[in-house]
Image (cartoon, grey):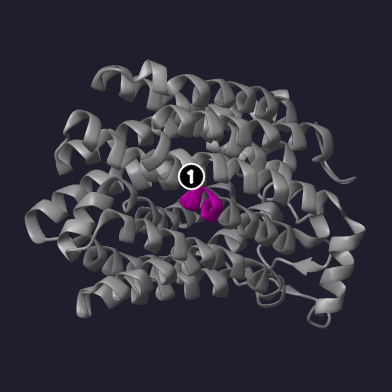
Amino acid sequence: MPGSAEIFYFVASYDRSYTLGVKNTPAANLSGQILVLTIGRLFLNTGIRMVYPFIPALARGLGVPISDLYTLVLVRNFAGFFCPLFGPMTDRYGRKPMMVGAMLLFSLGCLLVVVAPGYWVLGATLAVIALAKVIYDPAMQAYLGDVVPYRERGWAIALTELAWAGGLLVGAPAAGFLIEQQGWQAPFLWLGLLGVGAALLLWRYLPGSPRRVGPAPRWRDLVTTLRRYPVIWAAAAYLMLAMGANETLFIIYGDWMEDSFGLSLTSLGLAAAVIGISEVTGELGVGTAVDRLGKRPVVIVTGCINVLLYLTIPSLSLTLTSALISLFLLFLSFEMTLVGSVPLLTELVPQARGLVMSMAIAAGALGRTIGAIIGPIIWETAGFHLTGLVAAVIMGVAVIILAVWVREGENENDG
C-alpha cells in the first residue's frame, strides 16, 4: 500500500481553466487537507445515516407511526435534486466557500429540531442536512479532482469515503447512546455544534479558493455540455439505479432487524457499526485496487457480487449472527462498487467536474427517493425476500449501464 507521501503530493489541475494558487503545497499539507475534508464529511454523513437504524425510536419519540418517518426520509431525499444548481456555483466561486457554507447550513439545520421539536420540524432538519450534503460533496470531490492525479485519485477519494462508513461505525452507536441517555433530539444538538467546528477547520486549513477564469457559465452552456457528453447521462443513470437498489433494502433494515431479532437501541447502533466496518474495509480495499487494476474492471466485478448478495441475503439471514455477516458482505461489495466508481466519474469530463459530480449526486438522490418509496411498500406487503430480489434486479441494470456506456474522457492518465 503506498504511503501518504507518495500518494498525496500536489500536482497541477487537469482543468486548465483553473488557477489553484497552491502549486507548491507539500504532501503533508495535502494529507492534512484531506483529513479536514473527511472530518466535515463525517458529521454530514452521520446526520444522514443515523436516521435509518433509529427510525422506530424517532417515531416513538414523536408519537407518530413508523410510516410517517419513512415519509420524512422520502422528502429529505428530494433535496438531492437541487445539486445541479450548485455545480456551476462550485466551478465559479470555488470549492472552499461552498464547503464552508455547507457546514454552516448543516449546523443550522441540526439545531432547528433542538430549538423547536416536532414532526415537521424534524422533516425540515433532515431536508436541510441533505441539502448541505449535496452542496458539500460535489465541491469536495471536484477539489480532489483538481489536486490529485487520476492514477492516484482512487486512494485519495477512498480516504474521504471513510467518512461515509464512519457515519454508521462511529456516528450511529454514538447516536444510539445519546438517544437512550438524553432523548431523541440529543444527536442533533451535538452534530450542530460539531458542524460549526468543522466549518472553522475548513476555513483555516484549506488553501485560497480557486476561481474560474472568465465569465460565469450560463445555463445554455451547461445544457450544451450535457448534450455534447452523453456519458454524463449514462453515469447519472448508473448512480440512480445503484443508490436506488441500496436504499430499497437499507431504509427498512432497522425495522427488519428490530422486528426479527428484538434488538435494543444500543444493539441497533452496534448492528449499524457492523455495516460501517464493512464499508471501511471496502473503501480501503477498493482505493488500492482501482488504482492498480483499473477503475472500471474493479467496479464491474464488485457490482456483480453485490447483485448476488441482494438475491441471497434473505435466505442467509436466519439468525442474528448470519444476518450481521450477510449485511457485512452486502455493504462491503456495495461500497467497493460505489467508491470505486467515484474517481471514474471525476474523469468523465475533466473540464466540467463540478457539473458532472452534481449531476451524479442528484441522480443518486433520485435513486434514493425511488428506493425510499418502493422499499417500505415491498417490505410491508411482500416481505424481505422480494425486497432483496427487487434490489438485485435494479443493481444488475446499473452494472450493465456502467459496463457498456460509462468510460473515462480523453484526458485520463491510466486505465
Residue 135, image x, y percentages:
55, 67
Q: Is residue 136 above or below residue 314?
A: below
User: Is residue 96 shown left or right of residue 167?
Assistant: right
User: Is residue 256 shown left or right of residue 145?
Assistant: left
Q: Going 38% across and 16% down the picture, which residue do you hit?
A: 316
Please report the bounds of the magenta region as a residue range.
368-374
Residue at which label 1 appears: 247
Magenta span dominant secondary structure: helix
Q: Is residue 340 visible?
A: yes
Q: Is residue 145 above or below residue 334?
A: below
Q: Going 15% across and 55% down the picture, which residue do you hit?
A: 179
> Label 1 crowding class (10 Å Cα cut-off): few <14, some 14-19, many 20+?
many
Identified by mark 1, the residue type is Glu
Does the stretch in magenta take in 370? yes
Q: Is residue 211 above or below residue 163?
A: below
User: Is residue 344 shown left or right of residue 257?
Assistant: right
